[in-house]
Image: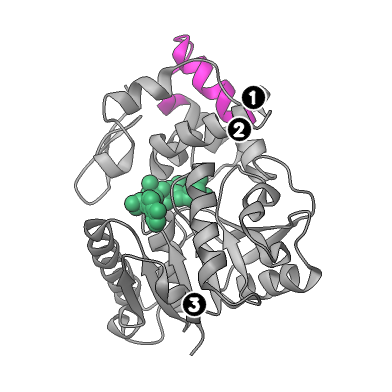
Amino acid sequence: MKKIFVVGAGFMGSGIAQVCAQAGYGVVLMDVDRQVLDKALAGIRWSTGKLSSKGLLNEPHETIVQRIITVTDLKKSATADWVIEAALENENLKLEIFRELDRLTPARTPLATNTSSIPITRIARAIRHSERVLGLHFFGPVPFMGLVEVVRGEKTSSEIFDKGVYFVRSLGKTPVKVRKDIPGFVMNRIFSAAFKECVELVSEGVVSPADIDLGMRLGYGWNVGPFEIADNAGLDTFVRVNESMRTLGADHLVTRCDLLQHMVQEGRLGKKTGEGFYRYTKDGKKIKDAH
Ligand SMILES: NC(=O)c1ccc[n+]([C@@H]2O[C@H](COP(=O)([O-])OP(=O)(O)OC[C@H]3O[C@@H](n4cnc5c(N)ncnc54)[C@H](O)[C@@H]3O)[C@@H](O)[C@H]2O)c1
């Protein structure tokens, strides 16, 4: 059984671990926080249980959960067939992790980052054989989103890029190939440009988040409104990604108003804290309209 090592067990890392295990891979899920790992495993058990009760899995969900082990350091990356990094959006942190991966893993192991904004070439600076670094940009919630951007850094080899495309397909996802390594890649740049306007319109009191979400669903055929997407992703992650985009020279895509920062300071991070632009029950159901 091929083994995938996932770094970071938050919203994205736990979802990536789940879809890898569902596709039959063995998974080592790593986080520095033991409580996060326990929560991630419980979430995967709950999510696969739900899928199973709807008849969407072709094996018992416990079999899937048992393919995942959890660890608090990077050592087991040495024997992995793929490494996917999904730790916090912070360039220095990612460089630190990749330096350690460079030391621990054989030079042929593909190293992927799930960064939302940082060019792959910048992260690959930490790796001597930087041709093995690429971007696999999953979308959240990972078990339900079909898209993965496969991003080519300046030094990524054709072999590794093709392997990335193949690997994404093996997870039942659809790859979109990004051939130039720019901040925010493609989908995040487009979403950021739209979301910047959404946040400013709300901040200026022109319209409520709920009405924008409604408008984008009914008027433009989006399945989920931009504020629902933001609440799902985590507003703290949005603030980090905005900060990163700003530093990387893509500030024209990022709002200058501080609504998101205020919400994060108040602990309103979205679904994960029970409140963001909407309020949520304990099991993540929306309970009332936007503020
Ligand atoms: N949230 C989204 O919708 C989304 C979508 C696509 C990509 N991303 C990207 O995925 C990455 C993770 O985002 P997230 O939303 O899962 O964030 P998150 O805050 O839910 O999870 C990040 C995890 O990283 C862990 N971590 C911190 N330092 C670490 C270290 N040294 N080693 C291992 N783990 C460490 C934290 O404990 C935390 O559990 C970021 O780069 C983000 O930009 C996020």
Q: Along the line of sight, which residue is nearer the eye, 4 or 258? A: 4
Coloring basis for residues? one colour
* Residue type, numbered disc 3: Ala
Quarter location, residue 50: bottom left
Circle 2/circle 3 CB separation < 8 Å? no
**Disc sitting over residue 13 in the figure:** none
Place of residue 14 in the rendered image (x, y in percent of width and height, measured from the top left): 38, 62
Residue at figure coordinates x 66%, y 37% from the top left: 189
Circle 1/circle 2 CB separation < 8 Å? yes
| Tag 1 residue | 251
Q: On the picture, is 61 further left or further right than 92? A: left
Would you say the magenta stretch is mainly helix, strand or loop? Answer: helix
Q: What element carries label 1?
A: helix
Place of residue 180 in the rendered image (x, y in percent of width and height, measured from the top left): 79, 49
Up-down relation of residue 67 to residue 18 (above or below)? below
Comes first in the chain, label 1 or label 2: 2
Quarter location, residue 209: top left
Q: Is mark 3 on a helix, strand or loop?
A: helix
Instruction: Report the residue that reaches farthest toward the left.
Output: 282
* Residue type, numbered disc 1: Asp
Q: Quadrant of the C terminus?
A: top left
* Residue type, numbered disc 2: Met
Mark 3: few/some/many CA within 10 Å (<14, 14-19, 20+): some
Quarter location, residue 275: top left
| Tag 2 residue | 245
Report how far apart the C-alphas of labels 2 and 3 lie in the structure: 32 Å
Comes first in the chain, label 1 or label 3: 3
Is 206 one of the magenta-colored residues? Answer: yes
Q: Along the line of sight, which residue is nearer the eye, 168 or 288? A: 168
Bounds of the magenta segment: 193-211
| Tag 3 residue | 78
